[in-house]
Amino acid sequence: MIEIDGLADRLDLAQRTAADTPSLADSHEIDSDDAYRIQNALIGRRTGRGESIVGVKLGFTSKAKMAQMGVSDVIVGQLTDAMRIEDGGDVDLARFIHPKIEPEIAYRLARDVDPDDPAVDIVSCVDAVAPAMEIIDSRYRDFRFTYTDVVADNTSAAGYVLGQWQRMQDVDNRAVRLEVGSRQAVGSTSAILGNPVRALHALVDMARRRAMPLRAGQVVLAGAATAAVTLTAEVAQCHIAGLGRVSVRGA
Ligand code: OOG
């Protein structure tokens, strides 16, 4: 039997104290179901402290990310209100262990989505799309983890920032540029599963398998379009052609 609560406590403490922890896989045999149970227990600790769930995020939806991290299957994590950073705002780097930042597309759900309904059309439930960035901060030592480790660790989710919402539209094949100080990563939105809209379909699939509710008003981060860049005490900004720009400043 895996100690779901004990492992969730270990990851929760690592996040709250910004102190890394060894990979769970070094000492435990964890399967995907256990990993999502640990993730839910971890989120339960956050909601128990008054945070609310405001959305979901997908990970490993691009080849660049799969190659960077050596993992090759889509994962899903949960976003809470405490992870939100205002566009143009400062982000205190001392909160994190070894933060990185990624350029993303965000979708907004205008209606609840029932993943068990075989006729569900998630795209028709989305009313807006925005340029976004996600801060990831693996709680594992040296950012080294297995697939089940990263799922248990809420897919490294640590922070997110949203630009201006735009009407829902096809955002395939848009140039993406992430700059952190003088470092940059460039790519295209089509790096996200061939078209970021596919991330929405992948999400319905995951939500069905994991009994994960998808509610009106929630944000969906579709996954990084490029490899992640280390976040330092500089301005990080992301530009997506036709959608606009979003920024934060590491402080
Ligand atoms: C896991 C999170 C990956 C993405 O967009 O692919 C992710 C990690 O690399 O630590 O969020």
Image (spheres, helix red, strand yellow):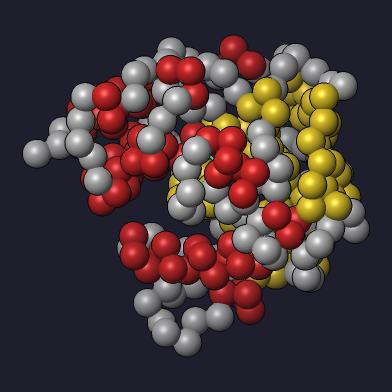
Q: Is residue 200 left or right of residue 38?
A: right
Identity of the residue furthest to the bottom in this view: 119
Dividing the picture into quadrants, the one containing residue 13 is: top left
Residue 45 shows in the view: yes
Image quadrant where one finds the C terminus: top right
- Vertical arrangement, residue 66 with respect to residue 55, above or below: above
Query: Is 31 placed left or right of 217 in the picture?
Result: left
Position of residue 190 measured from the top left corner of the image (x, y, whole percent): 73, 59
Instruction: Give above or below for 119 relative to 5.
Output: below
Is 19 on the left or on the right of 7, as rendered? right
Q: Residue at x 20, y 36 (%)?
A: 29
Number of labels in the image equals: 0
Which residue is at the front of the view, 49 or 37? 37
Q: Measuring 42% from the left and 84% from the top, which residue is drawn there?
A: 118
What residue appears at the point 64 percent right and 16 percent down from the top-left corner? 93
Can residue 9 be spotted in the picture?
no
Q: Nearer the viewer, residue 149 or 236?
A: 149
Side (left or right) of 134 relative to 34 = right
- Residue 192: image location, x then y, percent: 66, 56
Residue in view at x 29 percent, y 28 percent: 24
Query: What x and y, as percent, mark residue 79?
Result: 52, 44
The one of 33 and 122 positioned closer to us in this rendering: 33
Report the residue that reaches farthest toward the left: 1
For the N terminus, give its image quadrant: top left
| 125 up-or-down from 44: above or below | below
